[in-house]
Image (spheres, grey):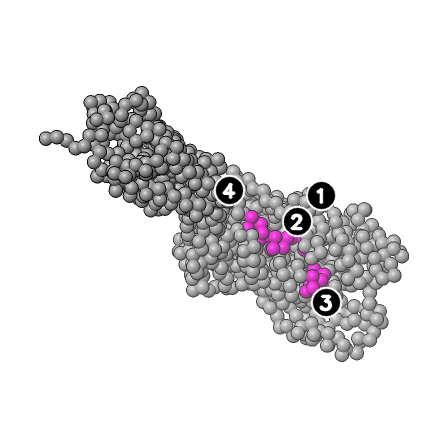
Amino acid sequence: MLLSSYVSYAVSSPLYSSSCQLQGQFHLNGMHKAGDVVVGGLFQVHFFSVFPDLSFTSEPQETTCHGFDVLGFRQTQTMAFAVNEINRNSNLLPNVTLGYSLYDNCVKLGIGFRAALSLVSGQGEEFILDKSCVGAPPVLGVVGDSSSTRTIAISTVLGLYRVPMVSYFATCSCLSDRQKFPSFFRTIPSDAFQVRAMIQILKRFGWTWAGLLVSDDDYGLHAARSFQSDLAQSGGGCLAYLEVLPWGNDPAELNRIVDIMKKSTARVVIVFAHESHMIGLMEEVVKQNVTGHQWIASEAWTAAAVLQTPDLMPYLGGTLGIAIRRGEIPGLRDFLLRVRPDLHHNNSYENNLVNQFWEHTFQCRFAPPPVGWVGALCTGDENLENVETEFLDVSNLRPEYNVYKAVYALAYALDDMLQCVPERGPFSGRSCASLQRLEPWQLVHYLQKVNFTTTFGDQVSFDENGDALPIYDIMNWLWLPDGRTKVQNVGAVKKSAFKGEELTLDENKIFWNFQSKEPPRSVCSESCPPGTRMARKKGQPECCFDCIPCSEGKISNNTDSTECTSCPEDFWSNPENELCVPKKIEFLSYHEPLGICLTTTSLLGTFICAVVLGIFIYHRSTPMVRANNSELSFLLLVSLKLCFLCSLLFIGRPRLWTCQLRHAAFGISFVLCVSCILVKTMVVLAVFKASKPGGGANLKWFGAVQQRGTVLVLTSIQAAICTTWLVTSSPTPHKNTQYYNDKIVYECVVGSTVGFAVLLGYIGLLAILSFLLAFLARNLPDNFNEAKLITFSMLIFCAVWVAFVPAYINSPGKYADAVEVFAILASSFGLLVALFGPKCYIILLRPERNTKKAIMGRGTTK
């Protein structure tokens, strides 16, 4: 509105056709120096003001400012020093004298805006250019402002005319928008970089849970948005709370904010605000005695001496702050010592800042003094070295260093422009810009390409958004034992073209305001150790979670894992669920107790068979051995021996050849054994029938040749079954992971279930047939009737294998093999004992019964 009123009035003026006439005049605090080219500046030299009427009138409008800011005045003098230094430099802007025009904004947007308009429009009563109102602008560019809010407003207007503005203190990341602020530059890093620097500090100390307080202005609100966005993208933590500090005195709101801080588990508090906000906040912190917090300060209050008091240091001691890069400006202190009041312009608004500084420093007044003044009068001969003032302390130049770089950036841009060779320029028609008809946008072009190095060794250049190469110092508020406060440099964060953003910290120098003298812990939930995963708490930020142990078979080998990963097929999780270890391999081994027992029993059975075979060979001529075909008895003993030995194939790690051989050997051995028993039973029945009248003809069918042939045929059938099974669907070794999650069971899969069933069924058929025949012959009148023994042995055999089937089906892994081995051994021992036990008893212990008469005798006599 202010600008539109100004333009409308200018257009309606009768003088518009011949000159550019000033439509209004402001009385502003300022400093001026004439030159071929003038550089403007906006600084904060007073804290407070009485704001005048905003309307344009013909009368000069006076602004009354009070509360002198010595540091703000030192910034104006730094700009004056830089201009004088450039004028003395024969290599920079030769034959061109720089001047300056500096104004005090009094920390008010309206005053700063008026000052900016005064700079770009001129302060003369009538600023005659020519008939077309074109020519060199009143100022080359503007250095300032110190506030993001004022800079946004001013740069929005100046950007319309492409007037370059180089800020030394405005950090709002919104100012990097080239669409909205096409002619804005700055020598201080953007808040976007400051936010990332703070996030790096949080990560460095493992602070994932922090509170954020911001001021209610562009500076704070943009920082809050940037902080939330960058923190979420980096995964570096969460905000426990985000509160906006009120303007002015609002005890109720401050009480609420501090109460939130007090109740929160976050031990770290980040504050993006000006020192004026911090004063009210800390008063409430002291009132509620909120201690035990680690404060992180933005650059706006890192160096605030007003907060470094004995009353506040118990709370703010140990503060880590982001500070503007400190620089050294040789010769500045000598220049400051030469600052003298202008006694000839005491009441002038053109150069009155020095006089106001003098009156503030020496607590005096220039003549004529104000009404009611009873103090000393200033003479102008007072000595600055005799008073204690921050003005002369050039050991910690931060904003001043940025002012210094901003002035030089404009000077280097102008110097590059003036060195343009005609017909080789960057503008249309390869033209160059001239000082007499300079367009502001032309200087913006050169300012964008500025690249120089300061005497302090820092490179100054601007990126495509007008931001300087970012660098910050990391400061720490040290509370000394004697009660004094020291703000010390403990590191830096900077961005380089090759290494990116880099944080360096000397942690040994950091003062921690805690009893432990160590960094505090500030987390919503403690880290989840390996072997667990994070489970986010419902309705809370992602930094608040529970640690859930990984289920069996899954692991997490990192801290704060979001999920557990499954182990590969042949691996399983260890008890801590941290590592995948190979699964235990299980099979019926020769080294375990069960395997040892079965192996021992098998070898024992084999040994007993060998002993019995030896006894029978030794007593082969006795009636007991010769009865019922001794050759079948020998073959039966050999088959039993094979049955005992084939059980060893079921013990040990399954391999292809053992899987194929075990069932074939088992099936053929048992068929051979049962075939011998069946033939024996048939022989007993044939002999009994042959003893009856007319039955002799049947005996010729059961001669020795027929008996051998029957055994061979019956065994060959089983051999054919086994061969067909092995050829069509052979048993193979298999790693079974279904029985146990943490074990691999090595077993032999039968391949064809039908083949295995036929093999067992054939053995069972022969066994049942033998049992039935023996059962029918059990009451034959022989004194030693072998049919009784066969009946009993077949009963044992059938009982064992009938019990084997369900036990085998329901036994997992190696126990299935153990059940089969047990069935083999039990049935083999049953046959051995039942068939040969009584015979060995008679042969060895009752030799008198080992006679043909005793064997063939019928009954007993009374």
Q: Amino acid at mark 4?
A: Val
Crowding near the residue tagged with mark 2, few <14, some 14–19, many ≥20 C-alpha atoms within 10 Å: many
Q: Which residue is mark 4?
A: 727
> Which numbered disc flags the more N-terminal residue, 4 or 3?
3
Question: Which residue is rendered at x = 87% and y = 58% of the image?
Answer: 430
Query: Which mark lies nearer to you, 3 or 1?
Result: 3
Q: Where is residue 415 shown, x and y percent of the image? A: 80, 52
| Mark closer to the observer (4, 3) | 4
Q: Which mark is residue 455?
A: 1
Left or right of 105? Residue 709 is left
Q: Which residues are magenta?
A: 178-200
**Which element type, helix, strand or loop, lies under badge 2?**
helix
* Residue nearest the viewer, comparing 135 with 63: 135
Instruction: Give the Cα separation between the discs numbered 4 and 1.
Output: 93 Å
Q: Earlier in the sequence, mark 4 or mark 2?
A: 2
Percent x, y for residue 507? 52, 40
Name the outermost residue toward the front: 694
Magenta includes 759? no
Say left or right for 474 vs 318. right
Query: Where, quadrant-wise, is the C terminus in this rendering?
Result: top left
Q: Find numbered disc 3 in the image and state the secondary structure of the residue it sits on.
A: helix
Toward the left, the furthest residue is 862
* Mark 4 vs mark 3, CA separation in Å: 93 Å
Q: Check if mark 1's residue and mark 2's residue have beta carbons within 8 Å.
A: no
Q: Earlier in the sequence, mark 4 or mark 1?
A: 1
